[in-house]
Image (cartoon, helix red, strand yellow):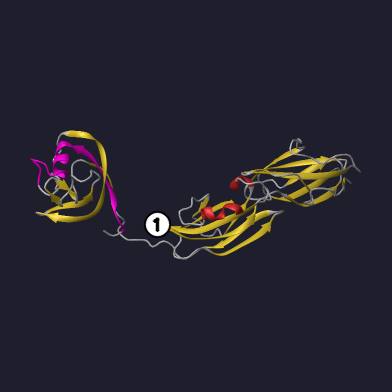
Amino acid sequence: MQGGAAILGITVTNEFVVDAQGGVGGVSNGVIRNVSGTLYGGNHYVCIVGWKVISSVEYWIVVNSWGTYNGDQHSGTSYLGYIYIPTNYSRIFQYSIPRTSYVTPPTAAPTGLTVSSIDGGIGRINFTWPAGATSIGICGNSINDRSNIMNESMTDMWTTQDTSVTYLDIHPNNSNYPAGEPIYIWVRGINAGGNGPVDGNVATVGSVQNVYGAGITAQVGKLHCTWTNRADHIETHVIASTSPLDIPNASSTPRAVIPKGTSYYDLTGPSGTTFYVWVRAKTVYGISNWLTFEGGTSNPSPHTIL
């Protein structure tokens, strides 16, 4: 059978038991009669490994799991071979027919595995799709445990079927490791035929992507603050203080919460007022740390309203 064995689910009857074990009243050599029969027990699964025609009737060649008293190769009362179930057997309730064509798993690991740091410390793993892959599976682990997952049976933490995706950004919410932690990233190609070989590299876990100020324009009665939104952002938080020593922390209340799609905030106040502006992002992965509008973690620049 092309594509390998398949699973067949049947409801067991008295007649099935007799036929499978070659008992009195049954058809010889493990051939199952196609009759509704009398219910013997619950559901049962067997493994289809082929098919054949017996007396013009098509049968599945089946491996059962009932020990030595079962099947067509018998000696006295011991049966060790196959049983034969009609392909239209009335007690079949579930089946999984083998694929009509066999798909070869990717034969090579993804290439081009390089590591870069973007957007203020995000660890990025870059890769090139191997031939024949319809999805990419990615797994990460501590660099001290890399040997535990260097195999093709590893469980993927992230997958993508978008062939335009050629990188993954590593941050605490998708790696379960803190920012700054070095972890080993494994990448492999996958298709309907199975998992391909893996390859890996070390990446450093970054922080949640932040917003970065594009500029602050001093105008009469206000400061016009603009920034660059990112695709995974939900909202942007803004804090403004008249003192450079007021450094916000995780519990600080934003002066303004700007929804996704809006990339500016007008900070109003009396003419001549100087503000020090901080921003942070709330994304699908969490809330980033506060950054100065210039992208730093300290020493914000002063901006004065005209």
Q: Quadrant of residue 286?
A: top right
Query: Which residue does the numbered mark 1 point to in the structure image?
Result: 192
Whole-percent x, y for residue 270 in the image = 89, 39
The local crowd at label 1, few if under 14, some if 14 to 19, many if 20 or more residues have their Cα within 10 Å, is some
Which residues make up the magenta segment? 3-27
Q: Is residue 299 magenta?
A: no
Vertical placement of 66 versus 113: above or below? above
Q: Is residue 14 magenta?
A: yes
Residue visible at 50% across and 63% down?
A: 109
Quarter placement of the N terminus: bottom left
Whole-percent x, y for residue 207 in the image = 68, 48
Kindly state the secondary structure of the residue where label 1 is placed: loop
What amino acid is found at the position of numbered circle 1 in the picture? Ala
Q: Is residue 34 visible?
A: no
Q: Quadrant of residue 193?
A: bottom left
191 sits to left or right of 220: left
203 sits to left or right of 106: right
Q: Is residue 11 visible?
A: yes
Residue visible at 38% across and 62% down?
A: 104
Whole-percent x, y for residue 256 in the image = 75, 38
